[in-house]
Image (tube, coloured by chain):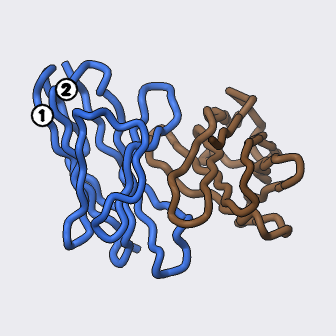
Chain colours: A brown, B blue
Amino acid sequence: AQTVTQSQPEMSVQEAETVTLSCTYDTSESDYYLFWYKQPPSRQMILVIRQEAYKQQNATENRFSVNFQKAAKSFSLKISDSQLGDAAMYFCAYSSRGAQKLVFGQGTRLTINP
Amino acid sequence: AAGVIQSPRHLIKEKRETATLKCYPIPRHDTVYWYQQGPGQDPQFLISFYEKMQSDKGSIPDRFSAQQFSDYHSELNMSSLELGDSALYFCASSSEKSGRTDTQYFGPGTRLTVL
């Protein structure tokens, strides 16, 4: 079974600075997808970024980018120019190819200090 | 853009009662997933449907059942409610036809409180 581990329960960063959230996963599959979801205080689950395992190029979405290391089974999220609205719980998630369930990590609570 | 709709948003029930949660996927999405998120926990997969057929099953209690209807909306039925069923229940949808089967978009969730 696949597992996802986020070893940082909490992180904090100054507004406008850069922060990196860590995620590792375990799988025997070669084709899969990785995601970062954001859950603000409203509890809505918001997709931040998506990475396909067969693509070597790291995904980017505006201020959000990932460092995907397939051999190391590592998938970190970098948030540049942090904004107060980035404060949330961030979940790393894994899914096998083909409309499969998401397996989530334990989450990292990110605080932005003004 | 249209999002996933869940109703009700909040629900309070007594122990041993029954609850029905509804989910309306994004238009033209054919796959629906249900997740349960307990307090301070990550979401746990319950069950999924593709084209009205159950496609996968997770740690869903036997007291729970679900189905997807011809208009693709889904309902999660929960009977003999227990205090431990108090949680946030998410529905998510994805579209195989669009080629983005692996991107799930979540609804706002239904907060169920069992007293």
Residues packed near mark 2 inside 10 Å, few (<14), some (14 to 19) or many (20 plus): many
Residue at the image point whose x is 57% and y is 47% from the top: A38
Q: What chain letter is assigned to the residue under label 2?
A: B
Marks 2 and 1: same chain?
yes
- Quarter containing the C terminus of chain B: top left
- Measure how far apart labels 2 and 1 are at the Cα level: 6 Å
- Are the residues tagged 2 and 1 within 8 Å (C-beta)? yes
Is label 2 in a helix, a strand or a loop?
loop
Q: Position of residue A18 (x, y in %)?
A: 82, 46
Q: Is residue B109 left or right of residue B44?
A: left
User: Label 1: few (<14), some or many (≥20) within 10 Å?
Assistant: some
Residue B96 visible (yes or no): yes
Q: Quadrant of residue B79?
A: top left
Please tell me in which quadrant of the rendered image residue A109 appears.
Answer: top right
Q: Image point 74% across, 49% down: which residue?
A: A28
Residue nearest the viewer, comparing B25 with A13: B25
Tell me: residue A78, above or below residue A104. below
Residue A67 horizontal side relative to residue B27, left or right: right
Task: Say which label, 2 or 1, has the lower sequence index.
Answer: 1
- Tell me the chain of label 1: B
Which residue in the protein does label 2 denote? B81
- Image point (43%, 55%), residue name: B106
Q: Looking at the picture, how far across and down is residue B41, in whole percent? A: 50, 29
Which amino acid, mark 2? Leu
Instruction: Name the residue rendered at 37%, 66% in the picture.
Output: B50
Q: Is residue B33 left or right of residue A50?
A: left
Give the camera-side residue of A13 and A92: A92
Give residue B10's position: percent from left, percent from top: 23, 39
Identify the secondary structure beneath mark 1: loop
The count of marks equals 2
Mark 1 lies on residue: B18
Q: Amino acid at mark 1?
A: Thr
